[in-house]
Image: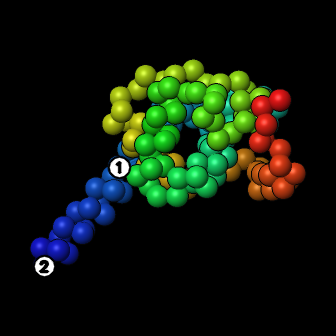
Amino acid sequence: MIAVISLSYQQTNASEIVNQGKQLFTNYCSACHGVSNGAGKSNRLAPPMIAVKKHYIDTYSDEQSFVKAVADWVTKPDESKTLMRGAIRRFKIMPPMPFPRDDLKKIASYIFKGDIEKPKGFDKHFKEEHEKGKGKKLN
């Protein structure tokens, strides 16, 4: 019985963290990385978050390493450590975001676990870009 209650609490807590992360994402990140920010593909300020998720999850497949990598990147972006060379080429490197570490972890948990909105035509674009090996080089 205690194990069931503990598991239920952990699931509720994890769900709460994802919900909080979604709200924090909306507040802090969606102006640049969101799909519903009103910017079309040509007016984007940064890659859509679904693209970030796909790149990071390929390298950091477990939640703990994913969350750490995303939080580390956001606080100290480093061109030499980018997983998205095409995004650096197109948008330049993002500025450091000095948000509380706990908030960054919640945002990253939401990105890892949540349903991230895709821009129209994203799957086709992503497949075309990555089949050709684009996005691998900075030059």
Q: Name the residue rendered at 77%, 56% in the picture.
A: 123
Q: Position of residue 6 (x, y in %)?
A: 18, 67
Q: Name the residue rendered at 72%, 36% in the picture.
A: 85
- Considering the numbered disc 1 on the image, is that residue within a helix, a strand or a loop? helix
Up-down: is 104 above or below 91?
below
Q: Classify residue 68 as left or right of residue 128.
A: left
The quarter holding residue 15 reads bottom left
Mark 2 residue type: Met
Q: Position of residue 68 (x, y in %)?
A: 43, 43
Near mark 2 (Cα within 10 A), the count class, few <14, some 14-19 or many ≥20, is: few
Mark 1 residue type: Ile
Q: Earlier in the sequence, mark 1 or mark 2?
A: 2
Mark linked to residue 17: 1
Q: Nearer the viewer, residue 15 or 51?
A: 51
- Considering the numbered disc 2 on the image, is that residue within a helix, a strand or a loop? loop
From the image, which quarter does the C terminus lie in? Answer: top right
Q: Name the residue rendered at 63%, 36% in the picture.
A: 82
The span from disc 1 to disc 2 (Cα, nearest Å) is 24 Å
Mark linked to residue 1: 2
Mark linked to residue 135: none
Q: Classify residue 79 as left or right of residue 132.
A: left
Near mark 1 (Cα within 10 A), the count class, few <14, some 14-19 or many ≥20, is: some
The quarter holding residue 136 reads top right
Question: Can residue 24 be seen from the camera position used here?
Answer: no
Q: Nearer the viewer, residue 131 or 49?
A: 131
The quarter holding residue 41 reads top right
Q: Residue furthest bottom?
A: 1
Q: Position of residue 72 (x, y in %)?
A: 46, 34
Q: Name the residue rendered at 60%, 34% in the picture.
A: 81
